[in-house]
Image (cartoon, rainbow, N blue to C red):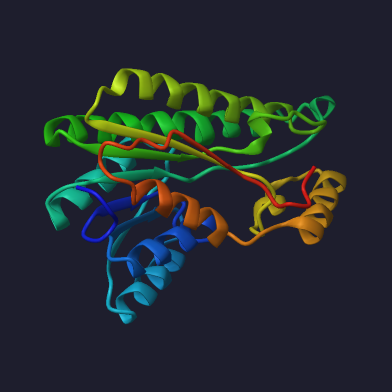
Amino acid sequence: MSGIEGKVVAITGAGSGIGEATALLLAEQGARVVLGGRGVERLAAVADRIGDAGGEAVHLRTDVTRRDDLHALVALAVERFGRLDVLISNAGVGTLSPLDDLRVDEWDHLVDVNIKGLLHGIGAALPVFRAQGSGHFITTGSTAAFRIVPNMAVYAGTKVAVRTICEGLRQEAGDSLRVTTVSPGMIGTEFAEASTNERVRAEISAARDRVAIPPDAIARAIAYAIGQPAAVDVNEIVVRPTAQS
């Protein structure tokens, strides 16, 4: 199936930021969307906006650190719409701090969400895609995978892992599946608020206010990858603000 109209798309982290913008854009273009995230009220609000505009959306509380939650999200797509065409693994955390802070619990959480969350999604969707003979994995990466800076060591490490896992998946996928990693630079989201180091949080917030681009810039990149003909696999897209170094 080519194009976006009629496709069934599941999105994690769909209650805000890039996930919300992507859900709204894809629904506007005719996709049927399955929204996953931890904030049920936010998910319901996004689903209501889509429904009010004439689109189709369902939602389910989804914690990507829980393997069963991803299986439930994929199952909801199949039960409601008969198939799943695209899984967008967008949920992620960005708690940033110098290694000297020794925020080991935050390091664990970065790994659990950014790496294990991706693997849980792959584990849930891959059997469905194989049975269908088609499917598309899209993952939100980060430009931190390309350029490491102070205070981002662990976060960047998780995003390097994401990029590596997705490239390995692409090589194993064969000619019936597509794999895309979209790596955003500075985006106008709540990303900075997750950091518990006050100095780092202030620095990231200031940088965001100076140069960030809106989440719908990434949504358009995702829509571009989905909309290609079935034989075209857009493997990697990097989207930065022009003002970002």
Position of residue 244 measured from the top left corner of the image (x, y, whole percent): 77, 47
Position of residue 52 measured from the top left corner of the image (x, y, whole percent): 33, 81
> 27 and 115: which one is in front?
27
Residue at 23% x, 54% y: name it: 7
Quadrant housing residue 200? top right
> 139 and 12: which one is in front?
139
Residue at 33% x, 42% y: name it: 69
Relative to 150, say whether 202 is above or below.
below
**Count of number-bearing discs:** 0
Residue at 37% x, 24% y: name it: 170
Q: In the rendered image, is residue 173 in sight?
A: yes
Residue at 56% x, 28% y: name it: 111
Relative to 102, say whether 76 is above or below.
below
Q: Quadrant of the C terminus?
A: top right
Position of residue 201 measured from the top left corner of the image (x, y, whole percent): 80, 49
Residue found at the far right of this picture: 199
Relative to 5, say whether 74 is above or below.
above
Residue found at the far bottom of this picture: 52
Q: In the rendered image, is residue 155 in sight?
A: no
Position of residue 147 measured from the top left corner of the image (x, y, whole percent): 73, 30
Quadrant housing residue 134? top left
Answer left or right for 220 relative to 5: right
